[in-house]
Amino acid sequence: MHTNTRILTDEELVATLHAKQDLSLEENPNETVSYLFILLVTAATIGTFHNVVRNILKSLFPNEYRNDKKNIQRIAYQFTNMIVNLILGIYGIYHYLEYLPDINSVPIIERISGFHEYSIFGALQVGYNLWALPIGAFFMNEPVSMLAHHVAVLCVGGISCFGRNGFRYHAPFFFGVIEISSVPLAMMNFCKNNRQLVDKHYPNLSLQLRIIFSIVFLVVRVIMWTPLMKDVLRSAALLGWTCRTNACVLGIGCFWLCAFFLTCLQYYWAMLILRGYMGLIKKGVQRVKTKSD
């Protein structure tokens, strides 16, 4: 006698997560409190470090601080971001390369609901952006797109950290690895805001940083990002489609929209990078034509 065993589709597998009563962060008050503590300590630590850097710069460059207080504050903000992104990037790369199994070897329900040990990545990102959002909004005059980026990361990071189904398989990459591209960006922004000083002592530094940032950004935030985010969006869509309550639909819907928005933002920034290089190429061609004429 032969028995036919039907293989469940991804949608049917994901649907089982809504009925699964496993131990999760939201059902374990101790873990919830622990990660809440971590994110609050992260925000406080970054804020303290930022204040220390600002005061050191104020002491080292009193005349510059009196003449251009905003620039000193901007440098302190950029330096703090650079250090935080460097730490997150290295931490993410370490886990991504050393411990994360190949995506093809991990079932979809495990990618969605498993890997609770990576909740710390969400906690760190929420703490980081809890600091960055008010500083960027009230003191740094960051553009609306960047403020929206902070809000979106708070949403996806919060769900990844505290949600039962937090898509934590991808946390080391999206909350860690990608931040490495922000290190040369912070240095590049410093050069842009202090062009005379940098050009005087390191005339080629700005161009070198721009090339490094562009390559790292396009590799990490476009080439590597796209297939992994495709899995996140597909998994989240299946999870939202099979929700049994309106609260579930709302939560997963917010997560999907924020993840999709962050993806569009990466592509927009990538377009600006490529457009900048096209402009440089056109200028180079025009110079060659001018010399030949």
Image (cartoon, rainbow, N blue to C red):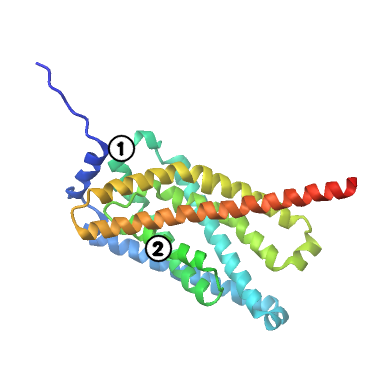
Q: Is residue 27 above or below residue 138?
A: above
User: For this view, does 105 lie left or right of residue 66?
Assistant: left
* Numbered disc 1: secondary structure: loop
Q: Quadrant of residue 69?
A: bottom right
* Quadrant occupied by the N terminus: top left
Q: Please tell me which residue lies in front, 263 or 160.
A: 263
Pointer 1 or 2: first along the chain:
1
Q: Which label number is shown at residue 131?
A: none
User: For this view, does 95 lie left or right of residue 52?
Assistant: left
Q: What residue is rendered at 32% in x and 45% in y?
A: 235
Q: Residues within 10 Å of mark 2 (few under 14, many from 20)?
A: many
User: Quick check: marks 1 and 2 in contact, CB under 8 Å?
Assistant: no
Q: Is residue 64 above or below residue 268?
A: below
User: For this view, does 114 lie left or right of residue 20?
Assistant: right
Q: What residue is rendered at 73% in x and 48% in y?
A: 281
Q: Which three-letter amino acid code belongs to the residue tagged 1?
A: Pro
**Label 2, on which residue?**
154
* Numbered disc 2: secondary structure: helix
Q: Quadrant of residue 250?
A: bottom left
Residue at the extreme front of the image, as rendered: 293
Q: Which three-letter amino acid code belongs to the residue tagged 2?
A: Leu
Query: Residue 80 at x, y = what percent?
Result: 56, 66
Residue at the extreme left of the image, as rendered: 1
Q: Residues within 10 Å of mark 1 (few under 14, many from 20)?
A: few
Q: Please tell me which residue lies in front, 234 or 113.
A: 234
Q: What residue is rendered at 51% in x and 77% in y?
A: 138
**Label 1, on which residue?**
107
Query: Residue 288 at x, y = what percent?
Result: 84, 46
Query: Residue 128 at x, y = what percent?
Result: 46, 64
**What is the spatial separation of the Cα atoms under label 1 and label 2, in whole angstroms?**
27 Å
